[in-house]
């Protein structure tokens, strides 16, 4: 097998013509025959006992060739890609051109490749570094957050539902007197005032008592994702089974003893301060780093294939869906409650995806221009770090992610270090309670081909 021709047909697109010899095709065809013969029924023969020529006369001479081609072309394609020296960013479109058991076969692979880019002005970047510090207000907020997390859920029986209560309800929705798909649930817990249902739904539960059965009248938004419901009035038949209330614990020394190893609330607050100061340091470093790589991305020049953006959107959408599943909700249900279709929702990730792809390409280019390298010791240390995160053997981690991906991530990290070390910063200070600036999260910097992300997905599927 081998590359016959390579043609760059347009920006970032190559067409490869590849041939596979008759000997290889025959050998692969023999393997397919041995695998499939036991499943083929031929009159006059026991299953799996019919000679190959008899099977081919009945089903055609090419009965085993299609599977043989499917077995052979991936390796042939990979070898051709390496020979040309291109880096595909999408699955190739494959077309078989010729196929004959005595001549082998040829196929054409059309593939989008990683673009050639340039990066300028990545050294000596001028940027403002915001240094965050901890105030008493920050400690108060963290204590209240932990206090809220340790609240008890108690059942309320002596009053009607109020804003902030959790209502356990059955409901079924009707439009024009007909029940509609996705409008029914039993034993659903709804926090009143959370605005997680259609506008007006939750407010009509307030004032109702346990055991009440009643109608809730709402109107679907005009832009609702299900066109058959958009803008239409609906009636939900609701039964209120239970009212629940969150009861916060008293904020005293006993509270500190119950939730920590400290004997007093003062000691517990001091520990929180230390942890918040560590978090403030990380926030300072992360936001500064994000600001720098955004400036680096601004200096990127090159035509990025749309498929790279779409693939990154796919990844972001999968990450969001996984987060929802950990919270007990599906993506479809989230979209239904939000009144948005999946295509519109994908658009909300586009700017983030574009940024991540640009940053990744820029960092890779910097690593190339600066001739940055990863030592075997650094590579092994990264494997050990990832293994520690997932509590797995290093050898097991290596089964999921290869040296190429790990090296790419480490090189991007070294490129970030180079940019940061050469930057010219001016410092300003802000309390931790200050709202975050309009910056993308720093973990997105090297996320496009993230080892940990790949491993997370692999482990989930394993």
Image (cartoon, rainbow, N blue to C red):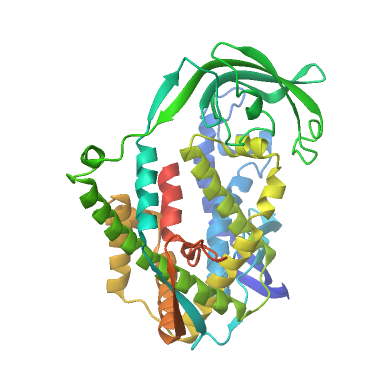
Q: Nearer the viewer, residue 236 or 413?
A: 236
- Identity of the residue drawn at 55% across and 44% down: 321
Q: Nearer the viewer, residue 45 or 317?
A: 317
- Identity of the residue drawn at 42% across and 62% down: 432
Q: Is residue 2 visible?
A: no
Q: Nearer the viewer, residue 70 or 297?
A: 297
Q: Is residue 145 visible?
A: yes
x and y percent of residue 259 in the render?
Answer: 25, 40
Q: Residue furthest left?
A: 263
- Residue 306 location, quadrant: bottom right
Quarter of the image containing the C terminus?
top left
Image side of residue 247 versus residue 318, left or right: left
Image side of residue 168 versus residue 421, left or right: right
x and y percent of residue 413 in the render?
Answer: 41, 73
Quarter of the image containing the N terminus?
bottom right
x and y percent of residue 136 in the render?
Answer: 35, 58
């Amino acid at each position: 097998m081998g590359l016959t021709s390579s043609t760059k047909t347009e920006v970032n697109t190559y067409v490869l013509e590849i041939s596979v010899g008759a000997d290889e095709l025959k050998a692969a065809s023999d393997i397919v025959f041995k695998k499939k013969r036991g499943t083929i029924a031929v009159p006059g023969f026991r299953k799996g006992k019919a000679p190959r020529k008899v099977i081919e006369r009945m089903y055609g001479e090419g009965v085993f060739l299609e599977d043989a081609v499917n077995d052979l072309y991936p390796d042939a394609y990979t070898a051709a890609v390496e020979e040309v020296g291109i880096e595909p960013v999408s699955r190739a479109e494959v077309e078989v051109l010729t196929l004959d058991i005595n001549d082998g076969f040829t196929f054409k692979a059309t593939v989008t490749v990683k673009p050639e880019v340039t990066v300028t002005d990545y050294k000596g970047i001028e940027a403002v570094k915001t240094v965050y510090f901890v105030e008493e207000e920050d400690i108060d907020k963290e204590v209240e957050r932990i206090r809220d997390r340790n609240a008890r859920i108690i059942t309320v029986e002596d009053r009607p539902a109020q804003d902030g209560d959790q209502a356990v309800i059955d409901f079924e929705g009707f439009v024009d007197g007909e029940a509609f798909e996705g409008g029914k649930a039993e034993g659903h817990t709804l926090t009143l005032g959370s605005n997680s249902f259609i506008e007006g739904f939750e407010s009509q539960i307030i004032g109702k008592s346990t055991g009440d059965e009643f109608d809730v009248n709402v109107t679907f938004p005009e832009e609702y994702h299900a066109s058959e419901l958009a803008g239409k009035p609906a009636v939900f038949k609701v039964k209120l089974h239970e009212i629940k209330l969150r009861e916060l614990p008293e904020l005293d020394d006993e509270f500190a003893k119950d939730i920590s190893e400290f004997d007093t609330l003062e000691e517990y607050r001091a520990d929180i301060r230390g942890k918040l100061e560590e978090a403030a340091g990380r926030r300072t470093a992360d936001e500064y780093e994000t600001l720098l790589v955004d400036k680096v991305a601004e200096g990127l020049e090159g035509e990025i294939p749309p498929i790279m953006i779409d693939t990154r959107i796919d990844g972001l959408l999968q990450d969001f869906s996984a987060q929802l599943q950990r919270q007990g909700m599906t993506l479809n249900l989230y979209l239904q409650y939000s009144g948005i279709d999946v295509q519109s929702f994908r658009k909300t990730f586009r700017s983030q995806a574009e940024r991540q792809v640009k940053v990744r390409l820029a960092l890779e280019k910097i690593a190339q221009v600066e001739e940055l390298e990863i030592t075997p010791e650094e590579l092994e240390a990264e494997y050990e770090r990832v293994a520690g995160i997932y509590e797995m053997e290093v050898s097991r981690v290596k089964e999921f992610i290869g040296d190429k991906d790990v090296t790419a991530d480490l090189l991007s990290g070294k490129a970030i270090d180079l940019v940061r070390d050469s930057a010219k910063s001016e410092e300003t200070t802000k309390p931790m309670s200050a709202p975050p600036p309009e910056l993308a999260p720093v973990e997105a910097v090297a996320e496009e081909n993230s080892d940990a992300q790949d491993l997370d997905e692999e482990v989930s599927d394993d």
